[in-house]
Amino acid sequence: MELSVQAKKGSKTAKQLAVLGAMRTDFGGFKLPESAITGRITAQCEAPPAEHLDKMIDKMREHICAKIEKKAKSKEDVEAAKKIAGVFLDVVKKTAATGRNDAAVSVSLDEESVALVAGRFVADGRKLETAVKMAVEEIAKKHPECVKKIVKLDAKRYMGVNLHVVTIPITDKCPKKEQAVEAVGKDLQIVLGFGPKAAYLAAGRDAMRSLLIAIKDSQDSRRWTVPPMEFTVDYDELIEFAEEFGPCCPKEDTAKFKAALDKAEDALEKAQGRDCLRVTALPTGRGVKLRLELDEGVLRVMSTMKHHRPHSTHKPKKPEEKCEVKAEKK
């Protein structure tokens, strides 16, 4: 299915849309092997008017500060949290003022390798990194041993990107510890990265290695132009993951959940590997074409899910009795 939009020739919108055909991304390498979900958006829009942006950020600041004052336990905590939030909002404002939107994400859901990598353009990555380090410093004041054990700042530097690692042990409190350990290892590794104009996130099995590969491949792919948007979901990978890491819910609900998954799996088998959903935006001169592709397997799964919708236990209210007054003609 395709939907095309074309701006009037010579209009301001037409000039903005014309730029989409020459866009290059800084995150073209963010595609994990056998990924279940991949997405990227790359666009250059007109920056919002300065006064509107100021008002928006001021409202966000007011809201965040009110939350901090309500939840913080001391004056020192309030001041520190407001300072960190201020730095973060400064980066948000500066990024919004550029009008640039460039981001990508990829998720692998293999039962033996669950991982995520993501990257996004920010106007001042170093300043955002400062906010993160300030937050870690404040947490360390109250929980020094915990922070020392799981957080490693400046763990690595690669191609101008500073990388920081958080390592969280998977304990017996995890409801599905065995599956989790098989998927990500004994510890969940989370990596945060900051470059001059980018922020990165990776988590799961081999998070550091996956992020380094994504950064390297992204450098190599900058020479090519890309569509404004690409998004893909592999339904077969999603169904397999759902079977392995099903919800922690009552037995009767679990049975219904598994029955629905079995139906979906049967539907995908009939599709013989045609099981992806794709959304792509393609530039067309002074317009853009939005393309939605649903493979046979996706349509079959959607059909099975339609027949497995949970029945509502809510009983509709009885309609109120109305008194009818009939006027008789004399």
Image (tube, rainbow, N blue to C red):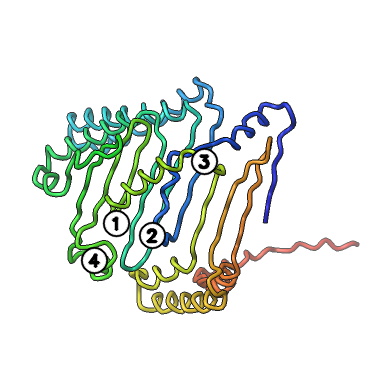
Front disc: 2 or 3: 3
Kindly report the distance in space between the C-alpha atoms of the residues bearing marks 4 and 1: 10 Å
- Which badge, 2 or 3, is on the more N-terminal residue? 2
Tag on residue 108? 2
Front disc: 1 or 3: 3
Kindly report the distance in space between the C-alpha atoms of the residues bearing marks 1 and 3: 30 Å
Q: Is residue 187 left or right of residue 94?
A: left
Front disc: 2 or 4: 2
Kindly report the distance in space between the C-alpha atoms of the residues bearing marks 2 and 1: 9 Å
In this rendered view, identify the residue nearer to me: 328 or 312: 312
Estimate how packed mark 3 is, as few (under 14), some (14 to 19) or many (20 or more) residues with alpha carbons within 10 Å: few
Three-letter amino acid code of the residue under disc 1:
Gly
Task: Determine the residue positioned at 36% across, 50% down.
Answer: 117
On the image, the x and y values in percent for residue 9 come to 74, 30
- Position of residue 235 relative to residue 157, above or below, is below
Tell me the element at label 2: strand
Check whether the beta carbons of the residues at disc 2 and disc 4 lie within 8 A of each other: no
In this rendered view, identify the residue nearer to me: 121 or 168: 121
Tell me the element at label 1: strand
Instruction: From the image, tell me which residue sits under label 3.
Output: 224
Estimate how packed mark 2 is, as few (under 14), some (14 to 19) or many (20 or more) residues with alpha carbons within 10 Å: many
Check whether the beta carbons of the residues at disc 2 and disc 1 lie within 8 A of each other: yes
Kindly report the distance in space between the C-alpha atoms of the residues bearing marks 3 and 4: 39 Å
- Which badge, 1 or 3, is on the more N-terminal residue? 1
Tell me the element at label 3: loop
